[in-house]
Amino acid sequence: MTSTAAPTARLTPKKLYRIVAIAEAITWTILIAALIFRAVVGEENAGPAVTIGGSIHGFVFLAYGATAILTAINQRWNPGLAVLAVATAVIPYATIPFDLWAHHTGKLEGDWRREATDDPRDQRWFDRLVRWMLNHPYLLASLILLAVVVLFTVLLILGPPVPKA
């Protein structure tokens, strides 16, 4: 008797980037809705809507930035494209058209670069470090999460990006 096992869903650079890009756009919706709610019902009646929406968006914004950088390194994007990818998070919903463009131009094609190739760039210390981290995905995910949490905490301590009037 043969079993038909379902294919395993691998988290490729394309899938990871798309998930986080969409999440970033969704959190823009949450933040904008909270701001509209506050404008309609007033500061006193809005409660913590903007604080909660802003915090969710801020955390996912940082996670998107980290994902864009990891993807850019893995896909060997040039620095200008990497900066553009991160910058799209600043403009509401811009991560979606960038993701679509990157998908259609093949910028997200390929798997994680876990093995060295004949490419001379694979001999650089940085590429060796990235390969080692990609071969230890739980450690990599933990370090990225830790970095996002630390940066998020520091930014919370510093205060909101726009001071209250």
Image (tube, grey):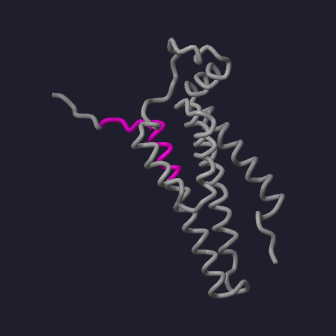
* Main secondary structure along the magenta-highlighted residues: helix
- Assign the C terminus to one quadrant of the image: bottom right
Q: How many marks?
A: 0
Q: Position of residue 22 (x, y in %)?
A: 49, 55
Q: Which residue sits at x=70%, y=70%?
A: 51
- Assign the N terminus to one quadrant of the image: top left
Q: Which residue sits at x=52%, y=31%?
A: 75
Residue reaching furthest to the top: 118
Q: Position of residue 119 (x, y in %)?
A: 53, 15
Residue 150 versus residue 20: which sits nearer the camera? 20
Quadrant of the image occupied by residue 8: top left
Q: Position of residue 6 (x, y in %)?
A: 29, 38
In magenta stretch: residue 18: yes
Query: Which residue range is magenta in the image?
Result: 7-21
Residue 97 versus residue 37: which sits nearer the camera? 97
Residue reaching furthest to the front: 80
Q: Is residue 48 above or below residue 90?
A: below
Q: Which residue sits at x=57%, y=36%?
A: 72
Q: Is residue 27 above or below residue 45?
A: above
Q: Which residue sits at x=65%, y=74%?
A: 49
In magenta stretch: residue 44: no
Residue 85 versus residue 141: which sits nearer the camera? 85
Q: Position of residue 50 (x, y in %)?
A: 67, 72
